[in-house]
Image (spheres, rainbow, N blue to C red):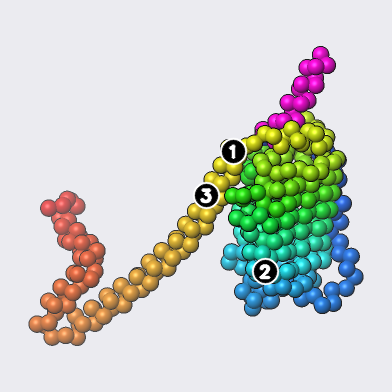
Amino acid sequence: MQKRILSFILCAVLICGLFPTTATAMGSQAEYTGVCTHGSHEGYIELTSEYLATHNDRLSSGKYYLSGDLNYSGSYYLDVAPNANVELCLNGHTLTFSNQYLLVLDDASLLLENGKVKLESSANKVIWGYNSEAVEIRNCDIDGNGTATYLVFINGDTGAQEVKITDSKLHNICDSSYAAVSMFGENPLGSLDISRTDIYDLAGASNGIYLDCATAKISNCTLDGGGIVNSLAHISEVSNVSITKNGIGLELQKAQITSLERQLRPSIQKRLKEAQELSDLKDENMALEYELNRQKDLMARLMQRVEAALTFLEEKLPEQFRPYVQRARAHILPEQKQEHRRDRGMSMGGMER
C-alpha cells in the first residue's frame, strides 16, 4: 500500500502540468501591496494620454509615473523603444488596455512596478518582450480579465533576455491560453527568476509557467490551477513552490522539478509555435482587411465621381456625341450596365425572356 501511495504521488508530480482542471485555492505567498514607496517622483515624467499621443505611443529611455488611472487608447500597443531603458511606476494606479498590450522591443529593458495592469477586452498578450534585454515586474497585479492568452510572453531569436517577477499577482487568462508566464524561442532564452508571486485563475487548458530558457529560479510561489511545463530550462533553484492541479496539492522541491525537467515536450513547443503563427496571421488579416476596406471606399468614391462626370457630359454635349458617352459608361461601369440589362430582361409575371 505504501508503494502504491508513493507511486501515485510521483506520477502526480510528473503530470501536474499536463491536464486541465479547476482547483481549490492554496495559501497566498505573494507580498503584493500595489503601494508606491518612492515618496517622490521628482525627475519622473508623468505618463498621460496626451503625452502618449504626442510621442507616437512610444516610451524612450527615462522614468515615468502615473498620477491616476490611465486607459490606453492607442491603435495596437504601447511600446518601449529599441535599446531604451524605461522605469514605469504605476504609483498605486491601474493601467488599462482594451485590445492592446505593453511591448518591450529589441534590446530594451523595462521595470514595471507598484500597481495594476489590466486587460479590458480580448488581446493575445498583456506584456510582451520581443528580443528584449530585460523585463522586471515588481509589486504588480497583472489581470488578463479572462481574455488574455498570455500575461507575460517572452520570445524572439536572441538568448540574452532576462525576466524577473517578484511580489506580484498574475491571474485570469482565457480558455485557449497555454501558460500565464511563457518564455519561448527558437533557441533557449536567457533566464527567469520568479519569487513571492501568486499565479491563479488559470483557464482549464492553461499552465502556470512554461520554460524554454537557459536557467530558471522559482521560489515562494503559489500556482493555483496550473503547473510548470519545462522544455529546455536548467532549473537551478526551486523552493517552497505550491501547485494545485487536478485537485491535488503539491509542494515541489528541486528533486521533483528535476524529474519534470527530463520530460521533454516537443508537442508543446509545436503547439506554442502554431499559436504564435495563428496570432501573427490574425494580425496580418486585420491589416489586410483594413486596407481592403479603404481601397473599396476609395473606389466607390471614384466611381461616384465618374458617374457624375458622365451624367454631366450626357446632359451638356450635343446629341451626336452622346453615343460615345454611353459607350464609355458601358466600359467603365459594366456592373450598372448588366443590372440595367437584367431590369430590361424582365417581362410578364417577372419572367426572363
Q: Nearer the viewer, residue 2 or 161?
A: 161
Dots 2 and 3: beta carbons under 8 Å?
Answer: no
Q: Residue 154: image x %, image y %?
A: 66, 54
**In the depicted view, which residue is nearer to us: 331 or 173?**
173
Question: Which residue is disc 1 drawn over?
Answer: 266
Disc 3 element: helix
Asked if residue 247 shows in the view, the reply is no
First of labels 1, 3 by sequence position: 1
Residue at 80% from the left image edge and 34% from the top image edge = 255
Question: Of all residues shown, which one is farthest toward the top?
Answer: 1
Q: Which residue lies at the image location 23% right of the left edge and 71% below the top edge?
A: 332
Q: Earlier in the sequence, mark 2 or mark 3?
A: 2
- Seen at 73% across and 64% down, the residue is 110
- Left or right of residue 50: residue 309: left
Label 1 to label 2, Cα distance in Å?
33 Å
Q: Which residues are magenta?
A: 1-19
Q: Is residue 327 left or right of residue 255?
A: left
Q: Name the magenta segment's main secondary structure.
A: helix
Residue type pointed to by label 1? Pro
Give amino acid for label 3.
Answer: Leu
Question: Residue 83 — which label?
Answer: 2
Specify whether residue 15 is painted magenta: yes
Marks 2 and 3, how far apart at CA: 28 Å
Query: Could you classify mark 1 by the number of other residues whose Cα lies within 10 Å: few (under 14), some (14-19), or many (20 or more)?
Result: few
User: Where, by quadrant of the figure, is residue 125 drawn?
Assistant: bottom right
Q: Which badge, 1 or 2, is on the more N-terminal residue?
A: 2
Instruction: Inspect the image, locate mark 2, and give the three-letter code of the amino acid beneath it.
Output: Asn
At 49% from the left and 58% from the top, the residue drawn is 284
Q: For mark 3, what is the residue?
A: 278
- Image location of residue 234, percent across then percent down: 73, 43
The reply to whether discs 1 and 2 touch (Cβ–Cβ < 8 Å) is no
